[in-house]
Image: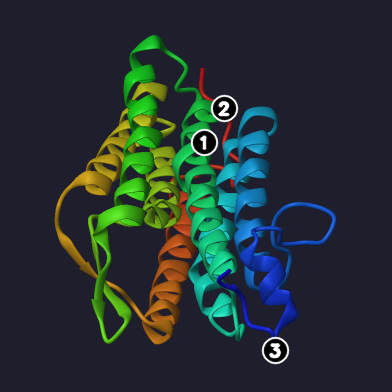
Amino acid sequence: MKKTGNPEHPENNQAAKGEGAKYIVGFYHYGVILTYLSAVAGVVGIILSLTVNPMGGVVCLLVSGLCDAFDGAVASTRKNRSDADRLFGTQIDSLSDLIAFGVAPIFIGIGLGMKEWYFYVPLCLFPLCALIRLAYYNVTEETYKKGKRIAFEGLPVTNAAVAIPVFYLIATMFTFLSPLAVKLIMLFGYCLTAFLYVLRFRMPKAGIRGLLIAIGIVTVLVITLALVRTYVCGVPLVSPVLS
């Protein structure tokens, strides 16, 4: 009978069976902590968007994006990972992304007041496009050079952590104009992001340095929009829910 696992690393033999932890299913180590935190932030964002204020959902979306930016780098520091451990990491990352960047963002719009029946279709298309994008990525999309992915095909769903907060801040600047104007701007943001999820184009994959630069740019952009929104447009930090 063919043996599996590495006898020098007993934990790999257990992981190869798909058992993960000894008494409960799954894998629990520092390599998956950020992925779990991203999913939790997504769920908290849904709750806050529906029960408190959509701004809470925006903050949680930004937290999810920050966690996701570095979860792969953290996981890669673990040595002697079993095949089951690696596969689990890939699957849990996609499932977490679906929650945090596919489902949670639409509740920001719902919490903002996008509850009319004609918003149902675009709000349903957003997570559907995210689901398709994630599944396509897992199956066929990877482009490798010397064993490392160098590009994505289509917009990665994690970019919702940038797009939706930016559209939210811009849209709520027009609260004084009319609730419908705010909702239409958010609708455009959802439709554009969903379309880019499934549009076939090549997007280079950023390394750690590129991620740090991108995070810096996004931070400056979000803070600038928040300041303009508050001090120029006179919109409170926590926006009123639209009717």
Relative image position of residue 100 (x, y in whole percent): 53, 47
Q: Do tag 2 and tag 3 residues touch (Cβ < 8 Å)?
A: no
Q: CA distance from mark 2 to mark 3?
A: 59 Å
Relative image position of residue 233 (x, y in whole percent): 44, 46
Relative image position of residue 8 (x, y in whole percent): 70, 89
Task: Report the quarter where the N terminus lies.
Answer: bottom right
Q: Which residue is mark 1?
A: 108
* Residue kind at label 2, given as amino acid type: Val
Q: Residue at x 27, y 47 (%)?
A: 197
Q: Is residue 111 above or below residue 88?
A: above
Q: Please tell me which of labels 1 and 3 falls first in the chain.
A: 3
**Please, what secondary structure does the residue beneath circle 2 have?**
loop
**Please, what secondary structure does the residue beneath circle 1 have?**
helix
**Please, what secondary structure does the residue beneath circle 3 have?**
loop
Q: Residue at x 52, y 48 (%)?
A: 95
* Residue kind at label 1, given as amino acid type: Ile
Q: Which residue is mark 3?
A: 8
Q: Residue at x 59, y 59 (%)?
A: 63
Q: Quadrant of residue 53?
A: top right
Q: Quadrant of residue 210?
A: bottom left
Q: Do tag 1 and tag 3 residues touch (Cβ < 8 Å)?
A: no
Which numbered marker is on residue 241? 2
Between residues 27 and 167, which one lies in front from this camera angle?
A: 27
Q: Residue furthest left?
A: 201
Q: Is residue 35 above or below residue 8?
A: above
Q: CA distance from mark 1 to mark 3?
A: 49 Å
Left or right: 112, with 136 as reference point: right
Label 2 packing within 10 angstroms: few (<14), some (14-19), many (20+): some
Q: Residue at x 40, y 65 (%)?
A: 221
